[in-house]
Amino acid sequence: MATRKQRGIPLSSLNPKFLHTNSTSHTWPFGAIAELVDNAYDPDVRAKQFWIDWTRIKGLDCLSFMDNGAGMNRAKLHKMLSFGFSDKKAVRDHVPVGVYGNGFKSGSMRLGKDAIVFTKTRNSMSIGLLSQSYLQAMKAQQIMVPMVTFRRDEQNQMEDAASLDAILAYSLFSTEKELFSELRAIGAVGPTGTRIIIWNLRTTTSGETEFDFDTDKYDIQIRANASEKTSESRVTMPESRYSLRAYCSILYLKPRMQINIRGQRVKTQLISKSLAHIANDNYRPSFLTKRIRITFGFNTKSREHHGIMMYHKNRLIKAYERVSCQRKAERKGVGVIGVIECNFLQPTHNKQDFDDTDKYRKTMHNLSIKLEEYWNEIRYKRKKEDPKCTVPIEDTVKVPDQVWVQCDSCLKWRRLPDGFDCSRLPEKWFCSMNHDPQFRSCMVEEELEDQEEEQRSYPKPFKRQKRNSKSLQEENVPEGLETSSPISPLPARQPKNTVLCQQSHCGRSTNSGNSLSALSPTTNACLETSSSLAQRSPLPLINLTALSDALKRMKRKCSSSGEIPTAEGIMSCALLPNTPPQGAGTSIHGNFSPVIKKEENELKKVKGRERNRNSDEQMSKMESQIIERFEAYQEPVEEDEEEWHDNEESTTTETGYHSTPEDITESDCKQDGEAEACSAEEELWSLQHQQDELMEMMREAVEERDACREELEVLRDHCAALEDERSQLLSRLEEEKEEKASFSTLCDQLKCELEKLKKETDRGGREDIAVGEERRKLKSLRFKVGHLLVSFIPALDLQQVDFNSEVIDKLLDQVLEEVRLTQLKAA
């Protein structure tokens, strides 16, 4: 094999065996057929109809594929028969499926060993052959693709003679007449299009093709012994696994093309609109800036067919993919279908799976969580509506929530009234038959698909109730476990008008049992309420900056007074309003005994010097410990809007603190500490309120930025589509100008010919008039001669004589001959 070079560097070669190797990526034959359907669907072809059929040519089973798209010229056909060439671009919102430039080669060679392509544009007709049999017969070392291009007058180019001979020798068509008959078959469905015929189809071990053409005359199915499962288990298998008609009906998330299989149209469906109990949820991955819409609902045909329908760029990649909650023994999510368009994932080479990356695994994990949430919410809703019902929702008869139908003319989808019986629809349906007058014309755009539902998820009362139940369980924790933690969790959001039902004590605490007896019943109730509020939320919401500032101020004050605050005292100053520190119910002091106060003052004086030496170190250490404790609780707590309003309503009634005269007698240090704590609490609340406002503003800014980005992408796509349309219009304008020039020349020629014909007509008219005049004179002369001949021939009847004929002339000749003979005899 000679080595080809470019710029002195050897070029890589491709062995013909690669055609079979490349086709092995398709383990499922319908995946190979989908590659051919995608080529007709993509925006560079824009086919409105696609036909799949089975035929027999010269005793061989063949699959034929035909579309009425734009067709291909010679250059595009050569790229399609080569490897890796793909220059498809999106047109408006129509995004191409093909990205690798390999679909036709891998798909066609998976179905059969040989394929021939007929394609037709407005200017030319081309034929290409991709055949393993031909390459084996030629013992080729490179992949050769014979191609022939014909003009509209059916004259081929001179350099295609060798390719034409190869096609006639190694294809199913041995004459040019047979080739042109296949090209004319494209003209029956449109002025342009493409037709593909594949033969030498793959067979099973029994010698039969892997496709079953006999079970259903309007379908192509996979034989039971060629599929992975037996025919008995097909009851639990989705029909799309073995029926091409069922697979094509869900192949696209929003179908834009009609597919016909063996002469009958496929009833495509909007899978996200054909479910029962539809609910829209949102999924926002950490690696994306926008939400991804997920549609959940129940299958209305079979409860055994459930899972996630995963699409990529409108094309089905994985069908009925069961997530973890549907695979467990509890059988959760039976009959539930989820629909998601995963444009952020990368499909595999055969477009039947996604690359197994961390993004894919995270997506599947979150889909399982979302589907289980939907399952619980639907069952909870049903039990709430009908508590006496014992039939599970998955076993009930269901009908789709919405009915959509596609116009056979413009291919737009229209929504019919809810509850409409689809069996009443005619074989062909058009926009003019729509019940809604607003969408009764093909010129009207499609109805918007619930834009408001894309922005937020469906309500989840079961999830909210479960969270409330968990909070109530935490509220009933035993007291010993409750006081084991040095920091009490805080509510995620605290109303501003709730009064703190405790007295902060900076620097001191006591375990005296008499301190509790000094409190009034109202004070005890207030403390219980405050403790209950502290227990309801598992996470505190702390502003660490404000906490650090409060600790610094307290440190300066205590340094001047010679006291070192305890952790409990710092917590009481650092926590948000309405939140008591842990053990608040056992740390509130009544009046202090003078003896105890005196002993404490003497003890402080003795140990004052030692504490002053270590005060700075202990304050710094304590500050870092408290900051580390609070950092673990800084994750925001999700709370439904309804729960937030309920919490606000439940805290609108202020609970007063009624202290006894004995409680008012406090030391000046304690009053100063309380004032400092209240000041810190107010500052913390103000800072927290500002933080919430800033977070809300940031969230709104992010949403506005995302909306602007999406609008920018739409505008870019629209500009690109307009640019493509502009270039197409310019090219069409040039073609129209050329056609106009040729028509002008032809018009001038026709005018000249018309003038000549007029002159000839005029000349012929004058000649006809002269001939008619001569004939009239001749007839008159014959009439006169006939009267003269009566004297010679008395038996002559002039009424029976045709004067337009030569009868009188012959009689005259006879009479003259007799007169001449008589004269001769007389002489």
Image: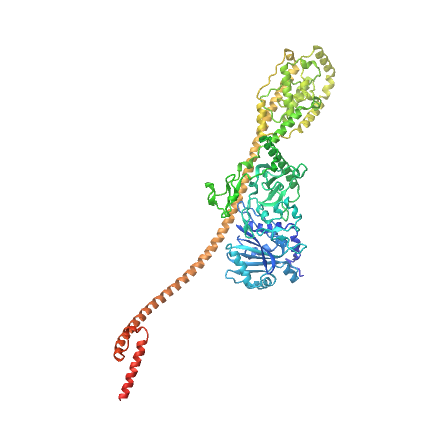
Which part of the image, by quadrant, shows the N terminus?
bottom right
Is there any visible trace of residue 602 in the rendered image? yes
Which part of the image, by quadrant, shows the C terminus?
bottom left
Examine the rendered structure and indicate whether residue 794 appears above or below residue 456.
below
Q: Nearer the viewer, residue 414 or 130?
A: 414
Residue located at (41% from left, 62% from top): 750
Is 309 left or right of 427, judged from the image as shown?
right
Q: Nearer the viewer, residue 810 or 161?
A: 810
Horizontal and vertical percent for residue 225? Answer: 66, 51
Horizontal and vertical percent for residue 98? Answer: 59, 49
Q: Quadrant of residue 699?
A: top right
Examine the rendered structure and indicate whether residue 582 appears above or below residue 315.
above
Is 625 left or right of 399, judged from the image as shown?
right
Examine the rendered structure and indicate whether residue 222 appears above or below residue 150.
above
Horizontal and vertical percent for residue 557? Answer: 66, 19
Horizontal and vertical percent for residue 798? Answer: 28, 74
Residue extending furthest toward the front: 795
Count of marks, rendered view: 0
Is there any visible trace of residue 539 in the rendered image? no
Coloring applied to the structure: rainbow
